[in-house]
Image (spheres, rainbow, N blue to C red):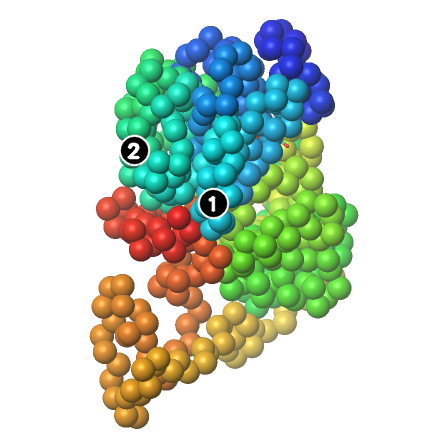
Amino acid sequence: MDFKEFNLHPQVQAGVEAMGYVTPTPIQLQAIPPVIAGQDVLGLAQTGTGKTAAFGLPMLHRLVQGERGRVRGLVIAPTRELAEQINEALNSMGKLTRLKSVTVYGGVNINTQIKKLKEGVDIVVACPGRLLDHISQGTVDLSGVEVLVLDEADQMFDMGFLPDVKKILRVLPGKRQNLMFSATMPDDIRILAHEILRRPVTVQVDRAAPAATVSHALYPVGQHLKTPLLFELLKHTDTESVLIFTKTKHRAKRVGEQLEKGGYKATSLQGNLSQNRRQAALDGFRDGTYQIMVATDIAARGIDVSLVSHVVNYDIPDTPEAYTHRIGRTGRAAKTGDAFTLVTGEDEPMVRSIERVLGAKIERRRLEGFDYAVPAPKKDAEFVRPPREPQRRKDNTAKPAGARPAAAKPGAAAGGRKSVPMPVISGKQGGAGNAGAPAGGREGVGAAGKRHQHPGGNRPTNHAARRSGR
Ligand code: AMP
């Protein structure tokens, strides 16, 4: 089937051609007709399936006719990278329509956004926190929204954004078209879909399985030999661009530095980077300045790197869904890709869960010529965090040596800080060590250290939300 059969507005069809799309992907085939017909749609699809165009094209088709300069399309996404990616796609696909689309997310100057919104826009692609700020300041008018898209709804839930999303829904007109996309369908998302969507058409592609063009392999190895094995793998593989995942941001930074020292054009993406450095790392990976990007799941969410030829799981992910999400970045559309996972003995239960979801056993490989017999050092200190510098109390009323620090109260981190070096911890991402992490403000990252948090528990409070760049 050809895109022409959708009878998209000629300016939108021209955008399809400019993007070089010839054949619609399965999710596009299923979703575009009902969206054009004005129906609500629930899309079960992961990143890499072409879901952005599945909602973007029919949305542009609808908005190209009618009033201009008023927000009529609203897309809500969990991370700013995803928001940027969607906005970029809408601007490219809709270039000839002259519809104006802008992003709204935290961690960047709100005044620039206010100025753009004032000038009049047709589509807003937003992360929930900052959008709520605009709503409460009266700097965005959503009373004309005709189409609402909730993208990566499961991720939005995982990151604790559901209360914010619900607040946003309250200011939208009741009569509107709703499109919701999610890679997985846990109960909470099913309930949300039931609340928001009206008689939706459900479309689904390859719910859990990653793109069929990806080949998978496991490399069993001792924890202490992961880095040397990674080097050997890179040496022996013809890679175009490689995305490497680690469990923590500390490990991402460390592995990135090791690769750089080893002569690779590598960079890392972790929560503590300023927005500028983060953007520079992303741009550099996209334009080929860096061949390798090392990142955590959270930091890498939403990156559109259609050129990724290899995904390496330096650390196995926490859930099978995270595995398919990581792998979704390679083998996109018609490209083929490889996915390597370094596994230690402890990872076996997770390997079995992933294999269950994939419906197939993953090949175990041993790298010829690699010395697997090197013993582990007595104490594996490689990823232990360096001790922090002693913290001085601002008021100079240092406690006498040996005094016990005051018990830390919630929200009183600075006051309760010890004036002795912090104990050495190996810190899991999203734990207490992450509390003040997002230096540059990180909507969709700061509050997100922990996946599958309890909705009432680790949600972004106002404080946390401020920190996360709202
Ligand atoms: P998405 O799942 O929306 O992130 O899209 C994944 C990648 O597939 C993006 O790089 C899109 O530009 C590309 N893509 C989307 N639709 C098509 C299509 N019909 N043909 C070829 N590539 C596509």
For label 2, the residue is 166
Hey, which quadrant is residue 13 in on the image? top right
Q: Residue at x 69, y 39 (%)?
A: 307
Using residue 362 as the reference point, say whether residue 367 is left or right of it.
right
Using residue 29 as the reference point, say whether residue 394 is left or right of it.
left
Ligand 1 located in image quadrant: top right
- All told, the count of numbered labels is 2
Using residue 399 as the reference point, say whether residue 467 is left or right of it.
right
Packing grade of label 2 (10 A; few <14, some 14-19, many >=20) is few
SS at badge 2: helix
Closest to the observer, 289 or 23 = 289
Q: Nearer the viewer, mark 1 or mark 2?
A: 1
Q: CA distance from mark 1 to mark 2?
A: 25 Å
SS at badge 1: helix
Q: Where residue 117 sits in the image (x, y, percent)?
A: 48, 34
Q: Residue at x 46, y 23 (%)?
A: 70
Q: Where residue 94 sits in the image (x, y, percent)?
A: 61, 22
Q: Can you see residue 235?
A: yes
Closest to the observer, 156 or 413 = 413
For label 1, the residue is 111
Q: Is residue 464 above or below residue 338?
A: below
The amino acid beneath tag 2 is Lys
The amino acid beneath tag 1 is Asn
